[in-house]
Image (cartoon, grey):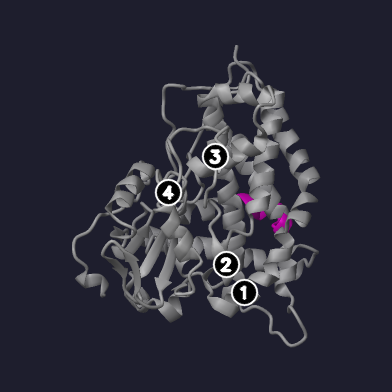
């Protein structure tokens, strides 16, 4: 169906200000609902846990826009979701091509390799938390910018060998292209800035080779394989640095907010009734750090029942953060309860495209939470009656800021 001939349908709020309520309304309408995204671009939104799980493991669903989304040529320049949708990397590959490309990256994020990073993650966390502890009593600070962001950015940039002079600019450029409220002309500028920074990183690494993940990408994987093309290198760096940074920064910030608004769970943790892993998994269930991951495409007509058929060639957006709040899967889904026996979620995806950085995000969050609340047991919200501003994005799900008082007066 042409983008210009789609009937009236729900319009997703580009600010993401009430994404969970929006997802609940879509979930009630059916297993998939045709919606309008910024652009405008139309796609089938999927918010039910069981349908998400089925589609993300279904070989009839692809992420390769060139092969399986005929309508991609009609998308306007500067489309707010272009950065993830049109990047050239394993992230948007299909079948054997995806399996082979992903295989180049996956070993670096195995549980064993990630476990070796604990000392580094702990040292960075200790430094950042000590800086919070050194603030004068009564000082208000944004925890996202003081802990969550610098911790996750430091870890992922160390892994990929990003030099110090590029880290802040690269992180800002990634944040900028995830804002789905930006007009198309401004988004073109932001996309250019992002790829300029990624190109600058590649140039730096070619001039300063080192043992890191960017250096690995620049090498041919085998004697009979060609090196990655420049677009594929840029897309892979965006996928890995962006996902590794954005996922964890939102997860840490959401977990701290949940604990400070439900202090009884901190008490339960101190009494040994629950673990930090329980808290991390429940945060992933109730506030998954990615709301809608664009895009997937139907290779053939897919009948989901209830009179819903996603037609061949149609784009699909998956509401991963919505899955954890599906009342058909979890009782009392909007209540934060780390003690619940079933904290099953799809926050890191499912199937062949399961997030490679899941182990690292969990490690960073467990270390951040345990260190923060051990060193600053009196940490409080600066504005307990105020709901923090959320990140203005359809793609990511999290708080744009979290003002806290590390040491009350």
* Labels 1 & 2 near each other (Cβ < 8 A): yes
Looking at marks 4 and 2 on the same chain, the residue that comes earlier in the sequence is marked by 4
Q: SS at mark 3?
A: helix
Q: Residue 381's x, y, as percent?
A: 52, 23
Q: CA distance from mark 1 to mark 2?
A: 8 Å
Image mark for residue 352: 2
Q: Is residue 360 left or right of residue 29?
A: right
Local packing at callout 3 (Cα closer than 10 Å; few below 14, some 14-19, many 20+) is many
* Labels 3 & 1 near each other (Cβ < 8 A): no
Looking at marks 1 and 4 on the same chain, the residue that comes earlier in the sequence is marked by 1
Image mark for residue 99: 1
The residue segment tinted magenta is 159-168
Q: Main secondary structure of the magenta part?
A: helix
Local packing at callout 1 (Cα closer than 10 Å; few below 14, some 14-19, many 20+) is some
| Residue on which disc 3 sits | 283
Name the residue at 74% across, 78% down: 221
């Amino acid at each position: 169906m042409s983008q210009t001939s789609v009937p009236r349908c729900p319009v997703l709020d580009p600010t993401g200000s009430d994404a969970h309520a929006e997802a609940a309304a879509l979930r009630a309408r059916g297993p998939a609902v045709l919606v309008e995204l910024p652009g405008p671009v139309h796609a089938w939104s999927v918010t039910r846990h069981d349908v998400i799980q089925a589609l993300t493991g279904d070989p009839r669903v692809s992420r390769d826009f060139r092969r399986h989304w005929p309508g991609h040529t009609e998308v306007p320049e500067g489309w707010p979701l272009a950065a993830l949708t049109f990047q050239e990397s394993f992230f948007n590959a299909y079948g054997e091509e995806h399996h082979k490309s992903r295989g180049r990256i996956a070993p670096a994020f195995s549980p064993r390799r990630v476990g070796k990073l604990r000392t580094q993650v702990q040292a960075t966390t200790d430094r950042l938390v000590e800086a919070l502890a050194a603030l004068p009593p009564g000082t208000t600070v944004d925890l996202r910018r003081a802990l969550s962001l610098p911790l996750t950015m430091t870890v992922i940039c160390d892994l990929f060998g990003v030099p110090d002079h590029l880290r802040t600019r690269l992180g800002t450029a990634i944040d900028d292209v995830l804002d789905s409220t930006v007009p198309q002309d401004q988004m073109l500028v932001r996309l250019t800035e992002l790829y300029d920074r990624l190109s600058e990183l590649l140039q730096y690494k070619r001039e300063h080779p080192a043992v890191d993940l960017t250096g690995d990408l620049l090498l041919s994987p085998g004697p009979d394989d060609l090196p990655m093309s420049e677009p594929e290198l840029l897309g892979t760096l965006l996928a890995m640095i962006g996902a590794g940074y954005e996922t964890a920064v939102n997860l840490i910030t959401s977990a701290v907010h949940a604990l400070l608004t439900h202090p009884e769970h901190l008490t339960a943790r101190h009494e040994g009734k629950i673990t930090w892993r329980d808290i991390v998994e429940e945060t992933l269930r109730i506030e998954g750090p990615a709301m809608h991951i664009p895009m997937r495409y139907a290779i053939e007509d897919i009948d989901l029942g209830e009179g819903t058929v996603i037609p061949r060639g149609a784009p699909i957006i998956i509401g991963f953060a919505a899955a954890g709040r599906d009342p058909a899967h979890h009782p009392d889904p909007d209540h934060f309860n780390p003690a619940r026996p079933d904290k099953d979620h799809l926050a890191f995806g499912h199937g062949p495209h399961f997030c490679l950085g899941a182990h690292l995000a969990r490690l960073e969050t467990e270390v951040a939470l345990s260190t923060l609340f051990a060193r600053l047991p009196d940490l409080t919200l600066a504005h307990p009656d105020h709901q923090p501003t959320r990140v203005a994005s359809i793609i990511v799900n999290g708080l744009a800021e979290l003002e806290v008082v590390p040491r009350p007066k």
